[in-house]
Amino acid sequence: MQRREFLSGIGATGLVATALAGCASGVAPPSRRVLLAAPTSTAAAGEAALPVWAYGGSVPGPVLRLRRGDWLDLDLHNRLPEPTTVHWHGIRLPNAMDGVPHLTQAPIEPGARFRYRFRLPDSGTYWYHPHLGAAEQLERGLAGALVVEDDAPPPVDRDIVWLLDDWRLDAQGRIAEDFYRFHDVAHAGRLGQRLTVNGAVRPELPLRTGERVRLRLVNAANARLFALQPEPGLNAWLIARDGMPAPQAVPWDAPLLIGPGMRADVVVDAVRAGRFAIRQFNGREAEPLATLVVGGADDPRARPAPVPSPHTPPPEPALADAALHTLRLGGGARSREGWPADTPEARAARQQRRAAGAREADPVWTINGQAHVGDHHGHHPPAFRVPLGRSVRIAFENPTAWWHPMHLHGHHFKVLSRNGEALTESAWRDTVLLAPGDRAEVAFVADNPGRWLIHCHVLEHHAGGMGTHFEVTA
Ligand code: C2O
Ligand code: CU
């Protein structure tokens, strides 16, 4: 025990020395970088040379690893054939850096660049992706993880990002071009037949017994709900959700739901030699998503459960005087409620734009009766306004026949209740997953001025109208 304390003492001294050195120079080390978004061709989704759109030439894009308090400083160069933006999913950042076209910034035109620069207030697992033509741009490969390292991470031997995705390929083994297909938009969104981890189909991760790994799971799929569970024989825990540490580690012994946009950090101990699949449950069926291949002699000494890192949580909402807003979802297949109004004129105009090459969804989904289709949130009034510093409660109601991961920009929230049942241990999140029929209440302090999106992270649902925004007025 003493020896342990001694060793960690040395580590701490080392850190202090580095911090002091940083102070002496007076500025944070320069970390400005360039990120290119461009078409390329690479090994992905089981194809040797798949034409994709990529950040930094790779699928997924590079893992950006920084520390809490660091500045992210990055020039996005757009070499795509169409405009784009980058959204830093889950980060509490200044509104102008949020990457929502026509709401927080102008689209970055082909050939143009945009500098994203902001401080990282929270440690955890985040990610970045386009927010313009997102259903197509993400599906073509544009997504990457942003890891903000903890000040005091739970000790692990390896810390690995697994960016999860699925790909719909056509008969030629190319990304199918049927974006915004009506059936996908009105049902579960665009599902692909090839499931991948970091772009690879059923990869293997070699481990030694006694090793403890942290897996940062990021669901970057347009629409697929991941429900993952390891085969028996590993010791595993869930330690964080949407970047925010759980109050305590929870044993991972049931399918873990990770909706589109959501993250889950898990810790896995390799205790026995063998092959252990992480399986994806799809209804009753399960298929291996990836396999941990553990070598070495069995190591029956069970290590204690990991302790999620301490963190400074976002400000606690004052529930008593919080403004309550209800956001009722509507529309979609198998439902009569909440379908948006559509007119023959609007349909004709869409047809004309499509004939000219535009890609867009039909209005199918609503929030409080309004369908905000496409990337035009700046043209709509906010669903509500709230003065800076005020606490907000949002009740999401899902009378539709489909799942919706509802994501809020610029803030983390607490899930207070689900279907009337109070949740005692609510971790902070940026996305709440609603099953058909669900009602969930969340709360947060509106402490970030600006106009912030709230939308379903099934990208086809958002494209088909399921998005709105709120405004925090300074
Ligand atoms: Cu990851 Cu508005 O989204
Ligand atoms: Cu949805």
Image: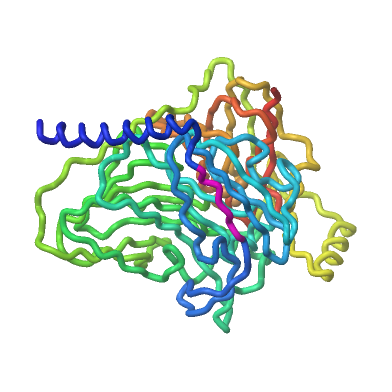
Nearer to us in this view, 21 or 376: 21
Residue 435 position (above or below residue 419):
below
Q: What stretch is highlighted in magenta?
A: 30-36
- Left or right: 58, with 100 as reference point: left
- Extreme residue toward the top, this view: 320
Q: Which quarter of the figure is the N terminus placed in?
A: top left
Which quadrant of the structure image shows residue 88?
top right
Q: Which residue is drawn at 67% across and 27% down?
A: 472
Image location (x, y in percent) of residue 437: 54, 44
- Left or right: 20, with 179 as reference point: left
Nearer to us in this view, 114 or 206: 114
Nearer to us in this view, 171 or 12: 12
Image location (x, y in percent) of residue 31: 51, 46
Q: Does the magenta-highlighted stretch encompass residue 35? A: yes
Q: Residue at x 73, y 61 (%)?
A: 110
Would you say residue 400 is visible in this rendering?
Answer: no
The image's colour scheme reads rainbow
Image location (x, y in percent) of residue 306: 25, 40
Q: Does the magenta-highlighted stretch encompass residue 26? A: no
